[in-house]
Image: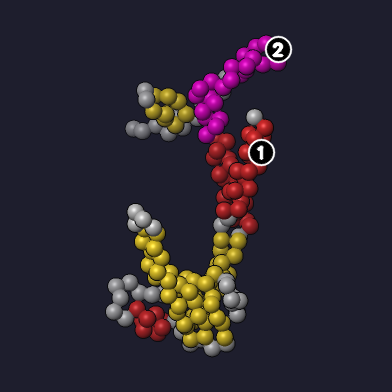
Amino acid sequence: MRGFDRMPALALTCLFAAGCYTLSPLEAPPVGTSVRARLTAEAAVRRSSGLEDPILHYDGVVLASTPDSVSLDVLVARSTSAFQPIELRDTVRLGATEIGSIMGRRLSASRSALFTVVTVAGAIAVIKGIDAVVGGTGDPGDNGEPPAALVPLFRWIGSHVEAVFWRPR
């Protein structure tokens, strides 16, 4: 049971580490940064010629950055077979006149914290609902009387669980 004492802390750490990201503008992206380069209208039309879907932006990792251009390593295609996953990547050089804006991916602490709080609250609600449906541990209260009745969030109906607060019509 000692390992289970650390499980909630480990779960919270994993949830927060997964994180939510946001894009923020960058002036001069450093090499190795994961960015989204949004194209100008003219560049989008030129780079999309002959393609079904328009290319409005490129997501990739900065390989080189100069005042007049940026080189990105972008994912072109991804495939998974029975033997191995395959990724096709290409280097795209964008001139300064083709780039509308460059956005860098940054960890959003507020979104990550909100996601963690909502996920933990949802997990607690599910656990409380299951506890109310199954009946808890059955331990008597402090004075030997059974604990107060709980209002269940879920209940067993035949072979499935139904939410008490929502009933189909």
Q: What element does badge 2 sit on?
A: loop
Asked whether residue 38 appears in the rendered view, the answer is no
Give the CA separation, mark 2 to mark 1. Answer: 32 Å
Residue position marked by numbered label 2 in the rendering: 143
Whether residue 34 is visible here, answered yes or no, is yes
Query: Which callout, 2 or 1, points to the residue nearer the camera?
Result: 1
Quadrant, the C terminus: top left
Q: How is the image coloured?
A: secondary structure
Provide the secondary structure element on which disc 1 rests.
loop
Toward which corner of the image does residue 10 lie, by quadrant? top right
Query: What's the residue at 63%, 34% (across, down)?
Result: 4
On screen, residue 147 above or below 10: above
Looking at the image, residue 132 lies above or below residue 51: above
Q: Which numbered circle lies on residue 156?
A: none
* Magenta residue check for 9: no
The label number, if any, that marks residue 6 in the structure image:
1
